Amino acid sequence: MNKILLILLFSVVCLSSCKKGYDAVAEERTQAEIDDKIIQDYIAGTPGLSAVAKRIDSAGIATGVYYVELAPGSGNDLFTSSTRITIDYTSKKLLTGEVFARSNNFHPSFTLGEVLRAWKLGIPQIKKGGKIRIIAASRYAYGPYDQPEINLPKNSVVDFEIELLDVTN
């Protein structure tokens, strides 16, 4: 009898501690809707931006990344995940315009496969010597993670200005 009571008590404790599971997909979907509204309102409310901002499609699917070509550059660059790019950039929080990162005339080089998803989608829109502005939903930038070293809160919609100084395949 004591064993049955002990098993019953253990079962009650285990079942009472169960909570509804965390739904990451639903949370990501909700954040995507919030980000998309922020970006669309920003573009619509900024004079002249709605005429030049283009949404990037990836495999025929609209993304949360918009770009404005500031200077096209030249050449016939082919971009792959192993393409090495050298850039000059400034990164801002979209709504406040606060700069949170910049290259400060130090021209870092990266392979395209190791940069933020927004950059992977945006940088191939220009050629060597070109300049682009990329407005990205949080899911294409730093996502649901705080970035305390650059003072960027989680789920931040960001605005990048990137000059493509060199491209090497």
Image (cartoon, helix red, strand yellow):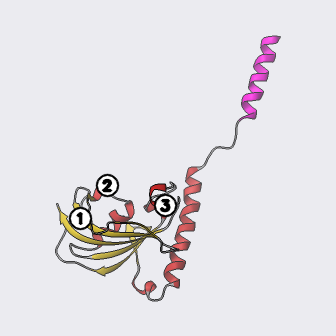
Sequence-first tag of 1 and 2: 1
Between label 1 and label 3, give the one nearer the viewer.
3
Sequence-first tag of 1 and 3: 1
User: Within 10 angstroms of label 2, few (less than 14), some, or many (20 or more) residues?
Assistant: few
Taking the magenta stretch, the answer to whether it contains residue 95 is no
168 displayed left or right of 40: left
Q: Quadrant of the N terminus?
A: top right
Question: Which amino acid type corresponds to the residue marked 3 in the rendered image?
Answer: Asn
Question: Which amino acid type corresponds to the residue marked 1 in the rendered image?
Answer: Thr
What residue sits right under mark 2 in the picture?
Answer: 114
User: Within 10 angstroms of label 3, few (less than 14), some, or many (20 or more) residues?
Assistant: few
- How many marks the image carries: the answer is 3
Give the SS element for disc 3: loop
Give the SS element for disc 1: strand
Q: Residue furthest bottom?
A: 47
Q: Which mark is residue 151?
A: 3
Sequence-first tag of 3 and 2: 2
25 displayed left or right of 55: right
Which residue is rendered at x = 26% and y = 58% of the image? 110
Give percent across and percent down for residue 113.
29, 56
Relative height, residue 93 to residue 15 (above, below): below
Q: Which mark is residue 86?
A: 1
* Marks 1/3: CA–CA distance: 24 Å
Quick check: marks 1 and 2 in contact, CB under 8 Å?
no
Between label 1 and label 2, give the one nearer the viewer.
1
* Marks 3/2: CA–CA distance: 22 Å
32 displayed left or right of 130: right
Give the SS element for disc 2: helix
Report the magenta residues as a range.
1-17
106 displayed left or right of 20: left
Relative height, residue 160 to residue 72 (above, below): above
* Marks 1/2: CA–CA distance: 13 Å
